[in-house]
Amino acid sequence: MKLLILDRDGVINHDSDAYIKSLDEWIPIPGSIEAIAQLSKAGWTVAVATNQSGIARGYYPLATLEAMHARLRALVAEQGGEVGYIVHCPHGPDDGCDCRKPKPGMLRAIAEHYQVDLAGVWFVGDSKGDLEAALAVDAQPVLVKTGKGQRTLEKGVPQNTLIFDDLAAIARELI
Ligand SMILES: O=P(O)(O)OC[C@@H](O)[C@H]1O[C@@H](OP(=O)(O)O)[C@@H](O)[C@@H](O)[C@@H]1O
Ligand SMILES: [Mg+2]
Ligand SMILES: [Zn+2]
């Protein structure tokens, strides 16, 4: 199975240090919707693993998050593609959950959903926690320079991290 796992904020849509708190604030990064559609039409299953501590912090309700993900699915479907399993961590940094990146709980949930092994599966993120979550389950850490990616790169990334400008560049590489 050709499985690609994406972080959301900073990879699919623009991120903000003030969190993405409403559907209006959820703005796709240029080329990302097209990239997901092209990948899925080329036989890739595209899953998403996203930290959403804004829910625990009370910045937005689950319904708003679900509206963002419905918008993502609709935009990709308009291009003839499909988004796979989306898993989010609604918890805060002090909740001690197993799903908040850098913990790999969400990646393991995706592996369970598809009944696949994560070894070598590309996990694309813009934060150090994304890369660490990938390494924790022997997946391939992949950094994009969008979102917080350039800042993450400047602080240093794990040795075997693959680096791309954006999700569109990853689609060009994989298709
Ligand atoms: O990049 P993904 O995982 O899709 O989502 C990240 C968001 O949940 C938010 O994560 C927060 O980190 P804290 O949760 O406050 O540590 C901050 O980095 C926000 O800027 C960011 O929007
Ligand atoms: Mg991110
Ligand atoms: Zn969690």
Image: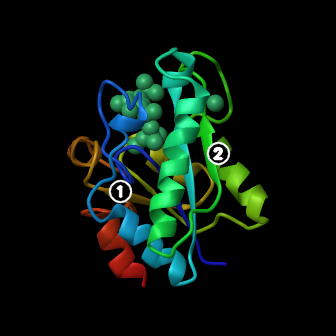
As measured in the structure, the alpha-carbon distance from the residue carrying label 2 to the one carrying label 1 is: 18 Å
Find residue 143 and name its label: 1
Expressed as whole percent of the image width and height from the top left, the position of residue 22 reads 41, 30
Residue in the image at 37% along x and 70% along y = 34
Amino acid at the residue labelled 1: Leu
Above or below, 171 against 149 in this view is below
Residue 6 image position (x, y, % from top left): 49, 56
- The residue lying toward the viewer, choosing from 72 and 174, is 72
Indicate left or right for 24 with 92 as reference.
left
Instruction: Name the quadrant of the N terminus.
Output: bottom right
Mark 2 surroundings within 10 Å by alpha-carbon count, few (fewer than 14), some (14 through 19), many (20 or more): many
Which residue position holds label 2?
106
Image mark count: 2
Quadrant containing ligand 1: top left
Q: Is residue 136 visible?
A: yes
The response on whether ligand 3 sits within 8 Å of label 2 is yes
Q: Residues within 10 Å of mark 1 (few under 14, many from 20)?
A: many
Q: Is residue 103 visible?
A: no
Judging depth in this view, the residue of 91 and 62 nearest the camera is 62
Q: Identify which amino acid the numbered label 2 is placed on.
A: Met
| Residue at the image point whose x is 59% and y is 31% from the top | 63
Residue 135 vs 169, above or below: the answer is above
Residue 167 relative to residue 87: left or right: left
Give the camera-side residue of 18 and 62. Answer: 62
Q: Residue at x 65, y 63 (%)?
A: 118
- Above or below residue 75? Residue 91 is above
The residue under the point 29% across, 62% down is 166
